[in-house]
Each structure stands twice: as C-alpha cells, then as structure tokens.
Image: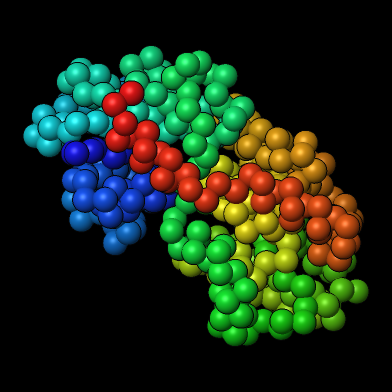
Amino acid sequence: MKILLGGGGTGGHLFPCLAVADRLLELGHEILYVGTVNGVEGRKQELLPRNRVLLNVKGVRGKGIKSVLNLFTVLRSTGEALKIIRDFKPDKVVLFGGYVSFPLGVSAWLSGVPLILQEQNSIPGKTNRFLSRFSKKVLVGYRSGERFFGEKAVFTGNPVRKEIILAAREREKVRQKALNELRLNPDKKTLLVIGGSQGALWLNEIMEKTVPLLKRYRDKLQVVHISGEGKSPELQSIYRKANIDARVFPFFEEVWKLYAVADGVISRSGALAVSEIALFGIPALFVPFPYAVDDHQYYNAKEIEEQEGCFLRRQEEITPNLLVELIEKLLFDIIVVRKFSENIKKFGIEDSAEKIVKEILSDG
C-alpha cells in the first residue's frame, strides 16, 4: 500500500508520525512523508524517512497584512500538496497535526483519497476539528477526545518512538548505562525537570527560586534539568551555589535515557511528554503550558490526576515553598511514589503504533 504521512511543526506532532512511519516501512509499505521547512522536521531532517517533501507553510495567524500573507502561503501550499498527491497517488493520507495538515487534508479530500487523522491531545485543535468532516476516521490519543468526533473516533493512544518503548521495557539496564554516562550517583534520587519546546522558560525561573530551598536535600538529591537554549550556564551556577549535584542541558536528544534514570519528573503536559512519562511509570508533577490552545495541556493530565497518578498544578499556583513540598513527596514519600508509579503506568500504551497501523491498513 502507498501511504502519505503528514505532520510536524513540533516534536509532539512529528515523533508520533515517525513512529508509525517506521512500523509501515518494516511491513514493506511505501510511504511519503510531508512536513514543513518551518518546523522541527526542517531542522532535524536526519530523523525523517528518505522519501520526503518539506513544504513552506505556516499557520493562518496574526492580524492585518501578516494574516493575509500567511493565508496566501497556505493557499499556495494547498496547490503544492495537490500536486504531491497526484504524483505519488497514495492509497491513503494519514495526518498527525501541525500546519502542514491543513493543505494536505484539503488536498486529500479534493483528490478523493481516503483521509485518516491522528489527534494527540485530549482536546483537539481547530485543524483536526475542521478536517474531521472529510476524514474516514480519527485516531485519538485520549478517551476524552472521542466525544469530539463521534462514530469516527477510534481510541489508539499516542504512538511513541521505538527507542522509548525499548528503554521502558529494559529500564534497569538502560538506567545503569545512563547513570554512568551522565556521571550520576546511583544512591541519590534523581529529579528530572523538562519543559518541552514551548515551556522551558517558566520552569527555569521557578527552579532558580526553588533551588536554594532544596539545600537540605543535597545529600540525597540530584537533578537533570533540560533548560532550552541560552540558560544552561546560569542554571548550572545556581545549582552549584546550593551545593546540589545537577546536570543542565539545553537539549538532550536521547530523552529515553533521562526517563530511565528519573525517580520523579517535573514536566509540561504536552501529549507526547505525558505518553512517554506514563510508559516509564515516573511519579510526576505536571504543570500545563498556560497558553496552549483550549487549555489542552491541562486536560491531557487531568484524567491521570483523577486516577491518582500524578500531581497537576497550574503554574500560577506554584510557589517555591509548594514546589519543594511536591518534590519531597515525588521522591521520598514511599506511599505517593508507589501509588503514582502504578497509576500513571496504566496510561502508557506500548502498542499504540501497531494499533494505528492496523487502522490505516483496514478497509473501514
């Protein structure tokens, strides 16, 4: 079967798409990946399938002339997408979100090619809501997302990279290697602080204020902190002054190693981060990005909180003193650790990519 896969812009759209692409290629199907030069896929082309096309498309946002120019770009990209579909002649088009999904989805409909959508978040974005009227089915990452698409919704969970799945399966083995690689102390509890592409700045700022209050845990606590670009030296200095052992990275490609060593995590609640953390069963404090469309990050973690699988706090609620209290519970309260680990793991779906591939290849 010939399948066109589209999605990207952020890792949350790209990596699920790549996980499914890998599985389809393993099964011998022909794929074409379509993304945008303006997204993470444009900067990380080495991760993409060999058969790929990157369009120059952005979202229709902004006001005045900017909005008009972006609309013109989308219309032009739709023309390019029509040509790609007519040249490749796919049996199906499968879209994972991001700016490229709109022109590809409209072009699939105009070309009469069956369209399948994958929605990662608990509350779908406007593009998928619009395109769902033309689609055969919508594969949702959250049960709570089913209500938006009616009979077209199929719950599959969110696919994650095979490296994540393998590391979760062999966590102790990966953990030992990563502890050595990062020169971490196996006798200390490891806190992972990770903000994602949009959310690192506030987490950096609250940790700057909180680190001095963590001094009393310095003999049994170490931190791995993903800071985003430009903040690593400053943060490393703050940890050093508090005499807390820390590894601060602007970005860490092999994130599964960090999950393997983490005893607790403070994270934004993007759909991909939640899915990955759940697979590892890491006790978590989720702090949703407050400007996410329709507040979807809050609802990504809300169901887990309701099942006593995590802490969920809005960033305006968090003070340094509260954060110290929550960190202490995540790492050192045996009852909380066991409960959170067991309950969040129930939300980790290891075979999501296989479920999605099955839906793609089915006739329905």
Residue shown at 88% from the left, 52% from the top: 322
Residue under the image location 42 percent in, 46 percent down: 353
Q: Nearer the viewer, residue 131 or 356?
A: 356
Quarter of image, res 1: top left
Q: Position of residue 37 (x, y in %)?
A: 28, 46
The image shows residue 90, relative to residue 337, as above or below, that is above
Q: Quadrant of residue 26?
A: bottom left
In this view, the residue in front, 109 or 59, is 109
In the rendered image, the quadrant that contains the C terminus is top left
Compared with 303, 225 (above or below) is: below
62 sits to left or right of 171 = left
Asked whether residue 364 is in view, the answer is yes
Q: Viewed as shown, does residue 233 lie left or right of 190?
A: left
Residue 95, position in %: x, y? Answer: 35, 34
Q: How many marks?
A: 0
Left or right of residue 344: residue 228: left
Q: Residue furthest left?
A: 87
Residue pictured at 71% horizontal, 83% vertical: 185
**Residue at the image position 59 percent from the left and 69 percent from the top:** 171
